[in-house]
Structure formats: C-alpha cells, structure tokens
Image: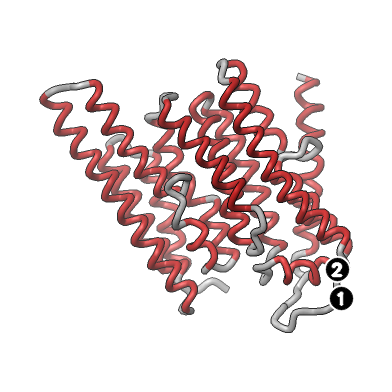
Amino acid sequence: MMKMYKLMFFSTTMMSTLISISSYTWLGMWIGLEMNLLSIIPIINNKNILSSEASIKYFITQALASTIVMMSIIVMMWKLNFYSNFEMKNNTMMIMNSGLLLKMGMAPFHFWFPEVLEGLNWNNCLLMLTWQKITPMVLLMYNTEFSLYFSIVIIFSMVISSMMSINQMSIRKLMAFSSINHMGWMLSGMIMEKTVWMIYFLIYAIITINISIMMKNIYYLNQLFPKLNISYSMKMFFMLNFLSLSGVPPFLGFLPKWLVIQTMIENNMFMLSIIMIMFTLIMIFVYIRIAMSSLILKNNQMNWTLKLNLKNNSIIISMMNFFLLTSLILITIMLNMI
C-alpha cells in the first residue's frame, strides 16, 4: 500500500512532466523540471542508507543540470535580443542540450545513473528508467537538428553502455547501461522522425515494466537463477524478455530498432547506423549470455535472503509476456492487411 504522502508526490511528478512538455516558454519548461526534481526525491528515499545515498546523488546531479539549463536560457534570451548571432545561438543550444542529456543520464553524462539505480528498489528503478526520461527527451525534441555533437553523444552511448555491461553482476546496473544504449537509439530516431521515437519509447517502457515485475526482490544474478529454477515458465519468460530487450528479430523489441535503421538509411546515415549496430551486437551478446545461463544452469542452493512470491503476479506476467512475444507477428499481419 502506497503511503499517502508518496501518492501525493507521485501525482505531482506526473503533473510536472505534463507542465514541462506542454509549456510555451523556456521558463515554464524549467519550472516543470524543478517541480519534477522536488517531487521525485521523497519517492525514491525509503529511509535506508542506500536509497538516501542515491537520492542525494540524484539531487546534486539534477540541480547541476537544472542550473546549466537555466544559465543557457538566460544567455540565449539576453544575447538574442541584442545580436541575434547564429553561432552564439548554436553554442547556447548545445549547452542546453548538454544539461538535458545530463538530466536523462545519457553518455558521456552518465556517471550518476548506474550508481543511483543501484540504491533503489525496482519500483523506483522503473520510474527512473521510463517516466523520468520523458521530459528531457521531449525538450530535446524541440531543438534537435542533426549535428556532429549529437553524433558524438550517440556513439559515446553505444560504446560506453556495451563495454560497461560486460561482466556486470548487478541487474540494476545492467538495466541502467541497457537504458543508455536504448537512449542512443531513441535520440537517433528522434532526430530523424518523431513518431519513431514515440514507438521506440512505448515498446521499451512495456518491456522494462515486464522485467521489473519479474525482478521483485532480485537484484543480482546469483539471486536470479534460484528463482528461475522454481518455475520453468518464469525461466522461459525471463529469457524471452531479455532477448526482446536486446532487439533479436522474432520479438517485439526488434520493431523499434528496425524502424530506426530504416529511417537512418533513408536519410543516408550509413556510417552512424553501422557503428550503432556493431556496438549493439555486444549488448546482444551480454543479454544472450545471461539468458542462456538462466536457461541451462540449474542451481538448487537457495539464498537465505531471497523472498519468492510468484503466485500473485503469475497471471499478469503471463498476459504481458504473451502480448510481448506475439506483438511483432500481429503488427506485421496488420501492416500487410493495410
């Protein structure tokens, strides 16, 4: 049962996102960002050492990002009134974009993101991985023009996420680096076509919600395998969801990457698309290694701190997995019928 004050702050978090993305002015956008920051801190702070440390790290980083965004707004409004210098405007917009990228935890401004997620429970991790990405991404959408700066950011996201996810034992950190990798794909899709970003984000959010439901009280790989050995259906669902998150073709997670690659090729972005595909293959290797280990290994030794509760969520998990695993086939049939 969610506490009353957390319910109030949760509703304020939702409302602040809507304020930011529907604002007509940069100042209204900034007010929505600040409301979001002040609302999310009480939600992620669960009165233990890890969550308190994570909330402090998150507050300091977000305050720095908000300061950068506000400074760029002031400079842009002040300079454009006098000079209307095109180069000055581009530099100021690049600074603002850097602040927004820092807010969403995208490489090379990612240093806080895995550390914050490591101290949160799965409900708060889900909030960080999905809802908290909406405001910075929509605000980036307002002023994105393809440039060398965004190309470097996308390549950094691909390289850092793929390299750091190798030999990662924490599932929360693995999901954080996976989010950085997916944000690189989302940013490239957003620059080319806004609808592609919306489809990508929606599918990514659905898959992340599904994995977070299955990961209840499971935070490390050595805790994961004993849980999966209890239920073979859960083991199969987990493996297929990880493959869907990686973007392997038969599953729904392949659809948004397919759309992004097709859009980039239509816009003659061959080199960047090849780099993205190459480093995403490393992420796919990490996912497949975990998925195959969970399928093959059978370890009957239970972790004494492990709490297992599969009965309450089994129907929800089964329905969501059926939807995820059959959606690509259904979408393909629908497109052929149109």
Give the x, y percent position of residue 166.
65, 53
Identify which amino acid the numbered label 2 is placed on: Asn
Query: Which residue bears the numbered disc 1?
Result: 300
Give the x, y percent position of residue 95.
30, 38
Q: Residue at x 72, y 78 (%)?
A: 306
Quadrant where the N terminus is found in the figure = bottom right
Give the x, y percent position of residue 127.
53, 57
Closer to the camera in the image, 152 or 129: 152
Residue furthest to the bottom in view is 304
Q: Residue at x 45, y 40 (%)?
A: 137
Quadrant where the C terminus is found in the figure = top right
Mark 1 and mark 2: span between their CA atoms? Answer: 7 Å
Badge 2 marks a residue whose secondary structure is loop
Q: Identify whether 87 is placed above or below 232.
A: above
Query: Which residue bears the numbered disc 2?
Result: 229
Q: Is residue 308 left or right of residue 111?
A: right
Q: Residue at x 57, y 36 (%)?
A: 185
User: What colouring does the structure picture have?
Assistant: secondary structure
Q: Identify whether 251 is placed above or below 46.
A: above
Give the x, y percent position of residue 221.
71, 66
Q: Is residue 258 left or right of residue 84?
A: right
Q: Identify whether 50 is placed above or below 162.
A: below
Identify which amino acid the numbered label 1 is placed on: Asn
- Crowd band around label 2 with a 10 angstrom C-alpha radius: few (<14), some (14–19), many (20+): some
Closer to the camera in the image, 173 or 71: 173
